[in-house]
Image (cartoon, rainbow, N blue to C red):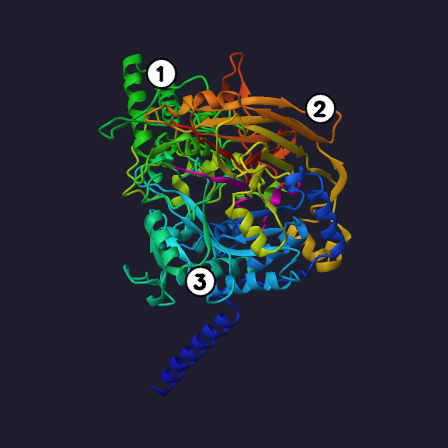
Amino acid sequence: MFKRLLIILGVIVVAIAGVLYATAYGWFGNYLDAGKVEGKRIPEAELAARESGSSDSGPQVSRAKQILFGDFHVHTTFSMDAFNLALPVVQGEGAHPVADACDFARYCSALDFWSITDHVEGMTPHQWTDTKNSIRACNASAGDPKNPDMVSFLGWEWTQIGSTPENHFGHKNVILRDIDEGKVPTRPIAAESAVGTLAAQARLGPDAKGRLFLSLLAPGGDRQRYFDFAKYIADRYALTVCPKGVPERQLPADCMEQTATPDELFAKLHDWGFPALVIPHGTTWGLYTPQGTTIDKQLSAKYHDPSLVRLIEVYSGHGNSEQYRPWSGVEIDASGKRSCPKPSKDYEPGCWRAGEIIRDRCLKQGSGPDVCEARAVEARQFYIDAGTAGFRTVSGAQPDDWRDSGQCRDCFIPSFNYVPGNAVQRALAISKPGEDGKPLRFTFGMIASSDNHSARPGTGYKEMHRFNNIEGGGPAQPGAFNDPERDRGQPLPQATRIDLATTQYSAFQLVDIERQASFFMTGGLAVVHSAGRSRQAIWDALQRREVYATSGDRILLWFDLANAPGGTQPMGSEVAMNEAPRFTVKALGAFKQKPGCPEYAETAVGKPRLQKLCQGECYNPSSERKRITRVEVIRIRRQQAQEKVETLIDDPWKTLTCPAGDAACTVSFEDPEFTAGRRDLLYYVRAIEEPSNAVDGGQLRCERDAEGNCVKVHICTKDYRTRNDDDCLAPIEERAWSSPIYVNFAGAR
């Protein structure tokens, strides 16, 4: 008996010792913090060089201002999807904390400002505290607050996703002006939506359970990253949701706050009363946006707050959301019934292609035309009913089968599975009657950013290192549990209905991430005409919409209304006048880049950290600029009554060729039709650079037949099917988009 007790006691002691040992060595997962900011203020000579390169070349009205470049859309591994992408199963690099983003922005991409915008659906109070402290540390290392080398803003992403066009409002970044405790919300405000719940976030995939299982099989150090991931998920399940209807300052500090619609988000921000901006982004990105969604429902006194929503992101590393097209991926009749539209010259709906795939299989099987047509009709409807998971209804379909369906064929670097009803041009065109008798309209300034998920703000400074600088990930070897080829299924001659309520697919498996991989870019930039480098000066430029967007290159752009009442007005202005407006445009191309990093960057943080952060390649400008080849002018008439939007957008309205021998492109134009038209209009410009290679610039890289139809694609995956050192380069025309100048007709209507 005594011997048995000793054995039991020994087993208990060994078990306790094992638990203590495993805990001490992180076998049960470690909390990954925000890291340590290592960089210091960059040398004064470098700051002076930047200022001289951006502020002394503009029109007279702008010479008192600097042009500053930034990124308002940056994620770290505090974001659930970013943590997934950091795991070994998708060849992830490991943790990318907030401090890495600070050092990357300062030394790799050499930005003037940036903002953290992690997804906060499930963010813990510990992570929010660490985020605030890291942003403060980044600013503390920037030097004099009146003239810092870089301004770091605090913010988050409100990640709302609807299941239908009616309940989809999309993703929006919340940017705060201040960073001090007592001047920022106690907790960030999350979205309550289909993927905004804790359970759904934990299922981000391909399959969280599968990844945790891999922790038992992974060798040595890799296993720890899965244990850390398990703790990451467990911390989220431990959160409690804040009660509804309670004033902000009376809520518990440690609850997770959720809002279902934009008006709820706006109300909570107003309750706090701190200066903030809410910036919609990725509006046409069909990876998660339901086909048929339009921005129209958000143009209402309830869902639009112009005091907060003053800017819109027109371009990011997820593609372009600028251009409106009259086609759609779904037809919705007056009763709400959804059906598949027929293809047109510039667009084939994904649902239509699904029907064609099934028809071809059916005919090859030997079935008659009538049977195969019925199956094609059924396949189209199954695709429509499955929403963004429509591709799953056609088992065994290869990328070549889908060709370029769902894509905008005549758009510049469009976002994947384009949703044109949510495009920026449509937002700028539409009007509705306002409660005060004045028309209700969107009056946006335009910016771009990266939407990077590896703590790398401003990755577009050099078009290289595709595997590290863009999103997505996949297995290094075939046969892995998340191998797309393994998950594809057999090529059946009939479509399969997907019941989204009962499906066992995880979140990432319900979106076509395989083809999406070819649509990830290095990202764009938010640019301001600022009276100085300080936080307040940049914020003031954002508020007055004196901002523009670029596709990543540091193009210099000025756009002014020359004959405005009271004097010249810059981009972002809204004026009323009677005479024909006259405009001036000046643009300079971005500096061509030298290889490697500037000496000051290597001196500041050392070569090993620089290699880890930016793979040894930094923003390193030469004295030679790329050439601006032309300026395109877009004119949009503001909607009256029930005018069709496509009749209101002139794109381009004018194309102005730039002189071949001049370093700067300076052009002017006027609109003699304005006075006779007697209506409100807006104008903005695109400054287009000479072609240069860009990561994923060819997107699907279609092979086309004699009629121009896409018959074969060469997608750029982020798994074993595409070499990690293949940047999938193709020439594009990098560009800058000005914010519009809104010119209202001042005479009697």
Q: Which residue is at the front of the view, 1 or 236?
A: 236
Observer able to see residue 197: no
Report if residue 126 lies within the magenta region: no
**Amino acid, disc 3:** Lys
Residue occupied by mark 1:
363
Instruction: Name the quarter where the C terminus is drawn.
Output: top left
Q: Upstream in the sequence, badge 2 or badge 3? A: 3
Image: magenta residue range: 441-462
**Looking at the image, how many numbered discs can be counted on the residues?**
3
Q: Residues within 10 Å of mark 3 (few under 14, many from 20)?
A: some
**Amino acid, disc 1:** Leu
Q: Is residue 103 left or right of residue 706?
A: right
Residue occupied by mark 2:
659
Q: Element under label 3?
A: helix
Q: Element under label 2?
A: loop
Mark 2 → mark 3, Cα distance in angstroms: 60 Å
Considering the whole magenta stretch, tell me its main secondary structure. loop
Q: Which mark is residue 231?
A: 3
